[in-house]
Amino acid sequence: MKMLAPTNMILIVLLSFPMCLIWGQSSGYVVYERYFDLGDNLYYFDTLRFNEGELLYIEKREGKNWKTTSGYNFKLAETNQAWFLDLATLECIEQKYDKQSKEYSRSRKQAKRLDWEIHEEYRQIGQYKAQKATAEHPDPNYGITTAWFTTEIPISGGPDRLWGLPGLILECSTKGSFKGAFVMEQIVFTPQDSLRPMKGSWVESGNRQKVNKKTLRDLLNKDY
């Protein structure tokens, strides 16, 4: 059996170390703190789970009512839903829980990717070097979205169903008429099972019954 020279063994270890680091960072979850720029300390937590090329963004919280110091009434609706994205196929699924029926439903969605512009601007967020990116949000109320992502965690995901950057989004903010921000609270690297939602019946938008306007008008004008 041919033995490797000590220098060759050291070289193999050094070359394999970055790959092991990337593999170790391919599964886990991020907890984001979302807060609102309303003059008060209003916030809640969302979770992004990731596993290889799968993302699952979880929004689960109780409904709350606030009255800000400026007299603004703020209502946060009760939410129990999850958004799934397969980055390889761009299959996108939304799962929602209905409190009245106590059942889940699933529907297929379009994976909306923002037209990101990456800037040569950097800052340190925790132990990670983050780079700035901006994009116009599809909802005009949000205006321009500013994200800080890190290529040190090669996961193309982030809070608020954002994706498409060459690294994990650690922070992001919006500066439209609705102002707010998501800030990374915690990152945990741990093995994950398949993230694809399995609970609930499928609800397809194409299955909605189409009403013929002429037929409906004739029925309304019909004498009985």
Image: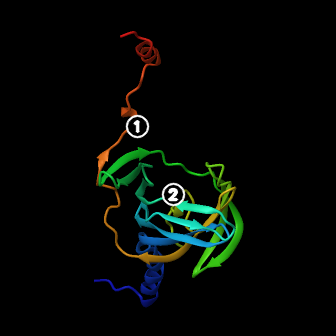
Label 2, label 1: how many angstroms apart (C-alpha)? 21 Å
| Residue 208 placement, left or right of 185 | left
Observer-nearest of 209 and 88: 209
User: Any mark on residue 205, and which?
Assistant: 1
| Residue 64 placement, left or right of 200 | right
| Residue for point 48% across, 72% down | 31
Q: Give residue 66's position: percent from left, percent from top.
A: 57, 67
Q: What is the quadrant of the N terminus in the image?
A: bottom left
| Residue for point 41% across, 55% down | 84
Q: Which amino acid type is marked by label 1? A: Ser
Within 10 Å of disc 1 (Cα), the crowding (few <14, some 14-19, many 20+) is: few
**Does any portion of residue 168 appear in the rendered image?**
no
Q: Give residue 187's position: percent from left, percent from top.
A: 47, 76
Where on the picture, by quarter, is residue 61? bottom left
Where on the picture, by quarter, is residue 34? bottom right
User: Any mark on residue 161, and which?
Assistant: 2
**Does any portion of residue 132 appear in the rendered image?**
yes
| Residue for point 69% across, 56% down | 176
